[in-house]
Amino acid sequence: MKNSSPILSKSLQDTERIAREFAENLFTTLWKDRGEAVIIQLQGDLGSGKTTFVQAVAKAFGIRNTVTSPTFVLEKIYIIPPENSKEGGFQQLIHIDAYRLADKADLSSIGWERIIKESKNIIFIEWPERVDGAFPEKTAKISFRFIDENTRELTFY
Ligand SMILES: Nc1ncnc2c1ncn2[C@@H]1O[C@H](COP(=O)(O)OP(=O)(O)OP(=O)(O)O)[C@@H](O)[C@H]1O
Ligand SMILES: [Mg+2]
């Protein structure tokens, strides 16, 4: 998924498969020798599938808790079962929704500068455009687009 060609998901099952492949990729090549957290910005309109994708990634990491939208709580932290961290060394999946934030200063309440430095963290953030300038150079992006009721287009950058 290094290129940025769009992928069509025609069902929730498709999205789960795409998320599984994405998670497997993280364990191996892309972020193996990182010294900091993996940060994935999720861009796209309301209802385009950002939270659904994080739920599917959480499932792929063997997280059994129900993953719900963090819109009202800003941040949710899920522990990745040790048997699933594999060579990626991931221990925590952090799900942030910046929809209600005014700017990047609002991230200080969750210790943003600290959590992005810890390589055990994999951080997904919805509405990253709300907190412009908060991201280090090394960050991944996925954009989501509503096509029709059951179809979404995902583009990985
Ligand atoms: N192929 C698909 N992949 C993912 N979600 C789909 C698909 N088809 C339909 N959906 C539905 O689209 C909705 C996506 O909602 P979701 O909460 O994930 O959006 P969101 O991008 O997080 O929105 P918000 O910006 O409001 O947080 C869900 O109700 C999901 O069931
Ligand atoms: Mg959402």
Image (cartoon, helix red, strand yellow):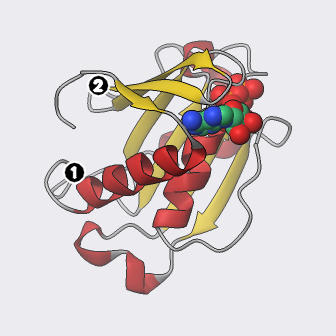
Residue at 55 percent across and 65 percent down: it is 59
The residue at the point 74 percent across, 64 percent down is 66
Task: Please identify the quarter of the rendering in which residue 67 is found.
Answer: bottom right
Q: Residue furthest right?
A: 72
Q: Which residue is nearer to you in this view: 6 or 129?
A: 6
Image side of residue 95 versus residue 84, left or right: right
Q: Say whether residue 98 is visible.
A: no
Judging by the rendered image, the residue that carries numbered circle 2 is 157
Residue 65 drawn at (x, y percent) = 71, 70
At numbered mark 2, what does the secondary structure look like: helix, strand or loop? loop
- Kind of residue at disc 2: Tyr
Where residue 106 sits in the image (x, y, percent)? 70, 26
Q: Residues within 10 Å of mark 1 (few under 14, many from 20)?
A: some
Three-letter amino acid code of the residue under disc 1: Trp
Which corner quadrant holds the C terminus?
top left
**Taking 99 as reference, is 125 left or right?**
left
Q: Which residue is mark 1?
A: 31
Q: Is residue 87 left or right of residue 37?
A: left
Q: Quadrant of residue 125?
A: top right
* Quadrant where the N terminus is found in the figure: top left
Q: Is residue 139 left or right of residue 79?
A: left
Residue pictured at 70% horizontal, 46% vertical? 75
